[in-house]
Amino acid sequence: MIALAAAPFAMPAACPVNNVPPVVEEVLAPGEEASLIARIKTLLIERDAVLVAHYYTSAALQRLAEETGGCVSDSLEMARFGHAAKQQTLVVAGVRFMGETAKILNPEKRVLMPDRRAECSLDLSCPAEDFSRFCDAHPEREVVVYANTSAAVKARADWMVTSSIAVKVVAHLHAQGKRLIWAPDRYLGDYVRKATGADMLLWQGSCVVHEKFKADGIEALKAEYADAAVLVHPESPAGVIALADVVGSTTQLIRAAAELPQRTLIVATDNGIFHKMQLAAPGKTLLEAPTGGQGATCVSCAHCPWMAMNSLKGLLHVLETGADEIRVDPAVGRRAVVSINRMLAFAGQAGIGIAGMSGD
Ligand code: 13P
Ligand code: SF4
C-alpha cells in the first residue's frame, strides 16, 4: 500500500471573523452606577479580589480598578500586576486572552472576568489546530505569536510577544539568523517585518477595530489640523502606520500623548483609551482617527465590541456568584508559560519595560 503524504497546510489569503457582535455599551439608570460601585467595592474585599482592567474598558471600570488598588494597563502589564498582587482572586476586565494569560501566569489563583464571552478577532482568527498544522509544515522556523492568542496557540509557540516589545524580540531573533512564523496579526507582522528585515511567514488575522482606520480620512483630518500629531497602534493597516508620528502599544501611545509638543492628537486605536490619554495629556485635543470614508464597512467603529461587554453589572454578578471563571488546561498552561516567560526574561535582560512606561 502506498502511504499518502499529508497535504501541506495552505493558509487562507485572509482569516475573516464572522459574527462580530454589535457594540453595546452599558446604560445605567440615575444613581444605579453609585450603588453598583459601592456593592462591588465591598465584595472585592470580602472575596479577596483585585480588579485589573484594560485601557479599552469603560471609564467607570478603569476608575474603579484604580480606586480599589487594582490596575489599568496594557495586556501584559495586567498579567504581571496579577502575579504581584497579594489577593487570591484576579478579576480581569478585558478580553478572554487577557484572562487566560493571567491564569497561565498565576495558576494557583482564581481568575474571573465580568463576561467570559468577550473574545478578540485576532484570537478567533487563529484556531490552535490549524495553526499547529501550519507550524508543522515549516519545522525550520521559530514560532513567534502575539499576546492576542489562545492558551493553546501560546503553547505551540517558542515566543509570545506584546506590541511594545515585538520589534525588539524579532530583531534579536533575526540577528541570530532565525527564520520565523508570525501569528496572528498580519498588520503588526508586516510592520515588524519591515522594521527588522526578518524573514517572517505571516498568519493572516486582523483586528476588527484597527483594520478599519482609513489613511485618506486621517490625511483629510491632517489637512484641517495642520499641527496635529498622529498616534497609531500597530494593529492598523500599513497605509495608516505610514502616516504616524508615533507607533506603539496602548501604554506607549498614552506616554507619547503626554510627551509630544503638539496640542492636537489624531489617535488610531480603540477610543476607550481616551479616558487615560486625556488624563495624561490634560488640555490637549484628542481626535478619533476616521474609520469612515471610501470602502468603510466597520461594524465597530473605533471601539471593540468585546471590550464593551465588560460591565459593572457583569462584574457584580461574577463577584456574587463566582461565574465566568477562567480555566486553562494545566498541561497547556505549563507549555504556554514557557513562551511568555521567554519574553519576560528577554525584557529583563535588555532592561526593557514591557508596558512601555519605563524607558523602552
Ligand atoms: P496592548 O497590549 O497594546 O494594550 O494591545 C492590546 C490590544 O488588544 C490592542 O487591540
Ligand atoms: Fe482584539 Fe482588536 Fe478588540 Fe484588541 S481591539 S481585543 S485586538 S478585537
Image (cartoon, rainbow, N blue to C red):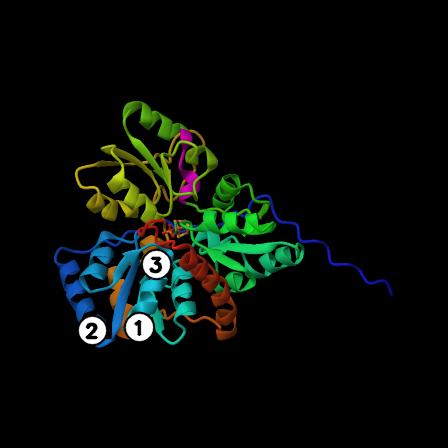
Q: Answer yes or no: is residue 114 visible.
A: no
Which kind of residue does numbered mark 2 sit on?
Ile
Which residue carries the number 1 mark? Answer: 89
Which kind of residue does numbered mark 1 sit on?
Thr
Question: Mark 2: is the Cβ under 8 angstroms from ligand 1?
Answer: no
Residue stretch in magenta: 209-215
Say whether residue 313 is left or right of residue 127: left
Magenta segment includes 122: no
Closer to the camera, 179 or 152?
179
- Give the residue at x 58% y 57%: 131
Task: For marks 3 and 2, give the CA distance.
Answer: 22 Å
Where is the N terminus found, in terms of image quarters? bottom right
- Give the residue at x 29% y 62%: 52
> Dot 3: few (<14), some (14–19), or many (≥20) neighbours within 10 Å?
many
Quarter assignment of residue 240:
top left
Outermost residue on the left side: it is: 31
Say whether residue 348 is left or right of residue 192: left
